[in-house]
Amino acid sequence: MFRKIVLAICALATFAALPFPLGLAHAQGTASFAEAVRIDGFDVEPVAKPAPGNELVFTLYGSPGGSAAVQIKGATGGVVLVESEAGVYEGTYTIRKRDKITTASTAIANLRVGNKVVSVILDEPLIGKAGVKRPAAAKLSGMVPKIDRFDLMSPPASLLAGEDLVLAMGGSPGGAASARVVGVKGKIVLNEIRSGVYEGTYTIKNRDRIMANSVVTGHLRLGERETNVVLGQSLLTGTALQSQSAARQSSRWCADCGVVEAINVVEVKGQGSYLGAIAGGVAGVLIGSQIGQGAGTTVAQVAGGAGGAYVGNEIEKRIKTTKHYEVIVRLDNGGSRMISYAAQPAFAVGAKVKIENNSLTLIP
């Protein structure tokens, strides 16, 4: 009974830590808290139809070290997103029989860091094809959105993980603005910082595959109408472009580079032969002959011979036992490889390495 009470308290504490209720999250997200906690993007892999058992996979990009959750209109439950990489939160919702999810259903994500919360509404449908906008509730007086400018502010020195892409858009006020970059999963949210001016910052992740010439498309939506524009500049400029080829030689661009995650010692016991068994058996018989008298001596000799044969065989196996070392490498692209060594390798766990010809080379 005591264990059940403890589990119930833990469950309530976990639920209380989630970034709900939504009303409070929206109120905080529109206040100064948004300066400290930000959501860069919110994406879903839609399903063809809302049949029980189908899965909605959500990805949220934002401030690292927080707790994120999604509430779906028409669903009987929510989904907690787990931080799989710094600033990347992922989670899956399995549709249930009692759910009433339709093409008009919305999804709202909350991101909490400490006592600060920010929210964002998904602008894509949960049902149907990816990239198709969710039907809006109403038109905004038939207004046609207009984009006056779309720029990359202060291009980064490189396109490695940790660098920021700061995008700015000017156009019709009161809209929903976002951007998509080829090589980045999901969209980047551009917040309206003042009337008709939208800005958004995206921190490049390890999983991204962004090039200097990656196409960046800006979107501005008003009600059911949307307009798009393509960024007319490189993501790297000046000296940064010239040094791009050198930057690609780092682990960020190396498909065969990674970090040593574990070094396991594996022992392989050898096979015993009839010679070991015979030698052990002879020794056992000699020992048995010294035990007992009369018939007892014969019994002792037989037992000693059998036991000696077994022991001799085991001793030979141990003598022939070999060791090898299995090195597990966690690759920069998220995968893993195992490289086997006959002798103990000259590097430790945590070393940066590159796989070449089924062997590892240390990266300085």
Image (spheres, rainbow, N blue to C red):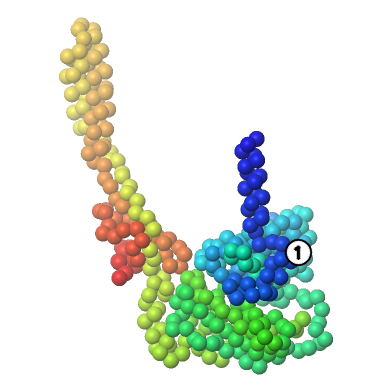
Which residue is at a point 29% across and 41% down the rendered structure image? Answer: 269
The quarter in which the C terminus is drawn is: bottom left
Across and down, in percent, residue 34 comes to 63, 74
Q: In screen coordinates, is 287 left or right of 238?
A: left
Callout 1 crowding tier (Cα within 10 Å): few <14, some 14–19, many ≥20: some
Q: Nearer the viewer, residue 19 or 207?
A: 19
Is residue 312 visible in the rendered image? The answer is yes
Which residue is at a point 27% across and 27% down the rendered structure image? Answer: 310
Mark 1 is on which residue type? Lys
The residue most toward the top is: 294
Q: Quadrant of residue 105?
A: bottom right
Q: Disc 1 on helix, strand or loop?
A: loop
The quarter in which the N terminus is drawn is: top right
Q: Quadrant of residue 6?
A: top right
Across and down, in percent, residue 32 comes to 64, 75
User: Where does label 1 land, which residue?
Assistant: 73
Across and down, in percent, residue 30 comes to 68, 74
Which residue is at a point 37% across and 77% down the rendered structure image? Answer: 249
Across and down, in percent, residue 27 comes to 71, 70
The correct choice, above or below, for 175 with respect to 260 in the image is below
Q: Nearer the viewer, residue 268 or 131?
A: 131
The correct choice, above or below, for 350 with respect to 203 in the image is above
Which residue is at a point 21% across and 32% down the rendered structure image? Answer: 276
The correct choice, above or below, for 42 with respect to 99 in the image is below
Q: Nearer the viewer, residue 6 or 102?
A: 6
Is residue 44 visible in the rendered image? The answer is no
The correct choice, above or below, for 238 with respect to 133 in the image is below
